[in-house]
Amino acid sequence: MKNPRNSATKRGFTLMELMVAMAITTIIVTVLVSITSIALDTWNRSRSELRASRQAKSMIDTMARDFESLVIRRGNTNQWLSAIDSPATVGKSIESTNASEFIFFTAVTDRYNGQVGVSGTDMGGDVSCVAYKLDYRDPIDTGGGSTDFQTFVMNRLLINPDVTFDKLLGKDDLSSAFTNYNTKLSDPENFICENVFQFSVTFNVQVTQVTGTTSKVVNVPVTIGKKDAENSTKRFKISGLGIDCDVSAGSVTTAELASGRITSVDIAMTVVSDFGIDQLGKRTFVAANGKSADEVKSDFLAKNSYEYTKTVQIPSM
């Protein structure tokens, strides 16, 4: 005679119960994978943004200090600042939209390798020449031949006051006088930060217009190199005689702009993530989903880059 209790004890799961359990397990695993994927994506993006922020801070803070100590003297023919739109192509799959070159005089405190006041090192000068240039290369390859780790590299070269006084001060063409130092500008020790896709500098010029017995002040922003900016120019130079650029903004003439003074400088830059830089070196952008190749490039940059800006007040010139 069979024992009913033993029969019930040995009874297993039915097929329907197994299917329900598998469905519930699949849903739970899917949700967990989805949450994990979202968390990893958020973490990676936050990490990329943090690194980009550090790169931007390194460059913008350095350039801001140099502009805050900008040195310009009136009443002479000497050139004190030269900013020109770079004629060379910077980039690979995507070219930088703005890679202007800057050379100007400044009284920064990191002259003499930061050893200001140290006997035997500090020669007593207080005006240095500084230059900025954006390039596309391996930031640590001294030979310049490596292509495996190329990226957009921002370099800064600071010329000590004694050399500045002997070789660069008192010139009426600063770019030509600086030619002998252009190769040093790309040396690895002058590296500031990487992954800077483009940077633009806008000089805010205050112009006083006089009509008869009345006068009014007009503020004119002049951006170096950036094609889509209002009042864009390929050159912006300052000498002891005034501002030299090819911009006339509305009612402000080129002659009136020449007699204006710079009140502030807006520094803007775009930093691309490490993933974006890696893809820029490998990927070929083609038209897709009804978008042109240029639109695909723009969408890619918008997704993998970050924008940073800073306004710097300039001492009276």
Image: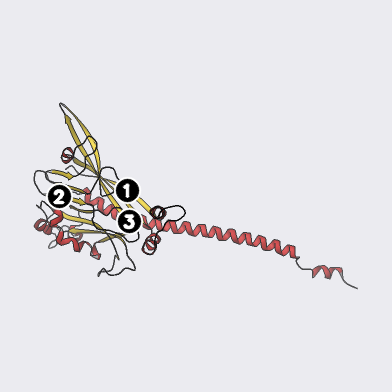
Query: Label 1, label 3: how many angstroms apart (C-alpha)?
Result: 14 Å
* Residue depth check, mark 2 versus mark 3: number of the one nearer the observer: 3
Q: Which mark, by number, is residue 309?
A: 1
Percent across and percent down for residue 201 are 26, 48
Percent across and percent down for residue 150 are 32, 65
Neighbour class for label 2 at 10 Å: few (<14), some, many (≥20)? many
Percent across and percent down for residue 175 are 16, 55
Which kind of residue does numbered mark 2 sit on?
Trp
Give me the residue at 44% from left, 59% from top: 44
The answer to whether residue 135 is above or below residue 78 is below
Neighbour class for label 1 at 10 Å: few (<14), some, many (≥20)? some
Tell me the residue that label 3 is attached to: 197
Q: State whether residue 230 appears in this view.
A: yes
The C terminus sits in image quarter: top left
Give me the residue at 46% from left, 58% from top: 43
Percent across and percent down for residue 23 are 67, 61
Which kind of residue does numbered mark 3 sit on?
Phe
Side of 123 relative to 157 (left or right):
left
Q: Which mark, by number, is residue 80?
A: 2
- Mark 2 or mark 3: which comes first in sequence? 2
Q: Quadrant of residue 140?
A: bottom left
Which kind of residue does numbered mark 1 sit on?
Thr
Give the camera-side residue of 155 and 298.
298
Report the number of discs. 3
Side of 201 relative to 174 (left or right):
right
For mark 1, give the secondary structure: strand
